[in-house]
Image (tube, helix red, strand yellow):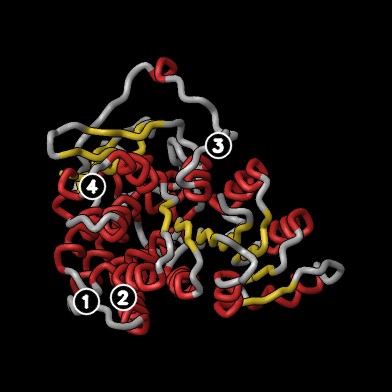
């Protein structure tokens, strides 16, 4: 088991739960980063005494540096700071839980620095999957999935004898707050309604992604890269209870599932302790408390983001990066109440189709596709 970690995105939902796991396991925390929440970051610095603390929002840097001037923690900011935290010598493992494309460069730098990576930043693989997986392979490092669905598949695969035995991956989806709704019922939904997730406690961006089912679309793309599976062998099933976190099916039609209460500390801890398991602070699952588990087909017509991501895989190249970039802007615009809920899916689909399906040769190619998609959304709202 690792002894020390660096956490990128320490003040968010995954980051704070990762620190809970670190407390439970007795790990040393050597670097912490935040976007804008310098109050919580200061509290974390005073508790964990990391060697490095990073504020991504450079406008908050001076204030934060002054606030912790009485500590021995070095302070940095911006993308350079994130990369510094990703390659810090004293950490055995880097947990990347930042939200959005900002996670791509730190992930690649961590791999190039020979760091094992626990990845909760799905946009990294969605936008730059070919580059990330090449860096991981070239440097001989391990990439452990933290998303509950991908962790579930990773755990189920521990019993897989060889690649030929695997038939398909089955990602489960909660369905979000608008499960069963049709287009006409979603035209006037509010931000507050979209943020009311039935099962998971997540940040605002990811919660909206769950409501549009963009989150599941991104996970299909991520799973394709993580497990080297084509899109036609990755299925989605809506499972409202979020007890089965995902499944795999073998060639003999046997299905293996990973179950647990909806608590992200299980996949976080497994990524840190793999291949061993330790006692966790998570509640024990009681299936009798649930009584029944339900399953439904996803609605690709109503939830256009999910369909756009499937098409992005089929089109290939930089189309997934475009879908992701468009979604980040559209998601933000909806939270600012500048566009409607259904506009998100329309804009993601249009921006993805606007992108030529050329392959990414460099990080700059990914960043260019991302920028083009963001500009497309802003020009077409």
Around disc 2, counting alpha carbons within 10 Å, would you say few (fewer than 14), some (14 to 19), or many (20 or more)? Answer: many
**Mark 4 sits on what residue?**
183
Horizontal side of residue 95 vs 171, given as left or right: right
| Disc 2, SS | helix
Q: CA distance from mark 1 to mark 4?
A: 26 Å
Position in image of residue 182 (x %, y %):
23, 42
Residue 284 vertical placement versus 348 (above, below): above
Around disc 1, counting alpha carbons within 10 Å, would you say few (fewer than 14), some (14 to 19), or many (20 or more)? Answer: many
**Mark 2 sits on what residue?**
373
Q: CA distance from mark 2 to mark 3?
A: 43 Å
Q: Please say if the residues under marks 4 and 3 sit with CB atoms less than 8 Å apart.
A: no
Q: Please say if the residues under marks 2 and 4 sit with CB atoms less than 8 Å apart.
A: no
Q: Is residue 379 visible?
A: no
Q: Please say if the residues under marks 2 and 3 sit with CB atoms less than 8 Å apart.
A: no
Which-is-in-front pick, marks 4 and 3? Answer: 3
**Mark 3 sits on what residue?**
278
């Amino acid at each position: 088991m690792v002894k020390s970690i660096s956490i990128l995105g320490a003040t968010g939902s995954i980051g704070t739960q990762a620190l809970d796991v670190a407390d439970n396991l007795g790990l040393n925390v050597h670097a912490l980063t935040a976007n804008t929440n310098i109050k919580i970051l200061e509290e974390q610095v005073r508790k964990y005494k990391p060697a490095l603390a990073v504020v991504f929002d450079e406008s908050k840097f001076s204030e934060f540096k002054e606030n912790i001037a009485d500590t021995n923690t070095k302070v940095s900011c911006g993308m350079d700071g994130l990369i510094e935290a990703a390659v810090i010598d004293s950490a055995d493992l880097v947990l990347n839980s930042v939200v959005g494309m900002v996670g791509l460069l730190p992930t690649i730098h961590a791999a190039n620095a020979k760091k094992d990576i626990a990845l909760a930043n799905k946009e990294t693989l969605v936008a730059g999957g070919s580059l990330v997986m090449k860096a991981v392979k070239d440097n001989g490092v391990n990439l452990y999935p933290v998303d509950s669905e991908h962790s579930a598949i990773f755990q189920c695969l521990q019993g897989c004898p060889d690649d030929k035995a695997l038939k398909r991956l089955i990602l489960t989806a909660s369905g979000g707050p608008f499960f069963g709704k049709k287009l006409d019922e979603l035209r006037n939904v509010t931000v507050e309604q979209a943020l009311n997730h039935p099962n998971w406690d997540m940040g605002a961006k990811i919660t909206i992604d769950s409501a549009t089912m963009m989150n599941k679309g991104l996970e299909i793309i991520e799973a394709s890269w993580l497990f080297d599976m084509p899109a036609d062998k990755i299925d989605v099933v809506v499972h409202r209870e979020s007890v089965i976190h995902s499944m795999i099916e073998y060639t003999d039609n046997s299905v293996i599932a990973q179950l647990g209460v909806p608590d992200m500390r299980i996949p976080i801890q497994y990524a840190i302790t793999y291949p061993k398991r330790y006692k966790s602070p998570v509640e024990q699952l009681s299936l009798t408390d649930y009584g029944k588990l339900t399953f439904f087909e996803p609605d690709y017509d109503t939830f256009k983001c999910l369909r756009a991501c499937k098409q992005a895989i089929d089109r290939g190249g930089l189309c997934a990066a475009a879908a992701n970039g468009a979604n980040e802007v559209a998601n933000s615009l909806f939270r600012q109440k500048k566009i409607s809920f259904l506009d998100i899916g329309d804009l993601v689909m249009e921006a993805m189709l606007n992108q030529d399906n050329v392959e990414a040769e460099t990080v700059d190619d990914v960043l260019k596709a991302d920028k083009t998609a963001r500009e497309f959304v802003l020009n077409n709202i």
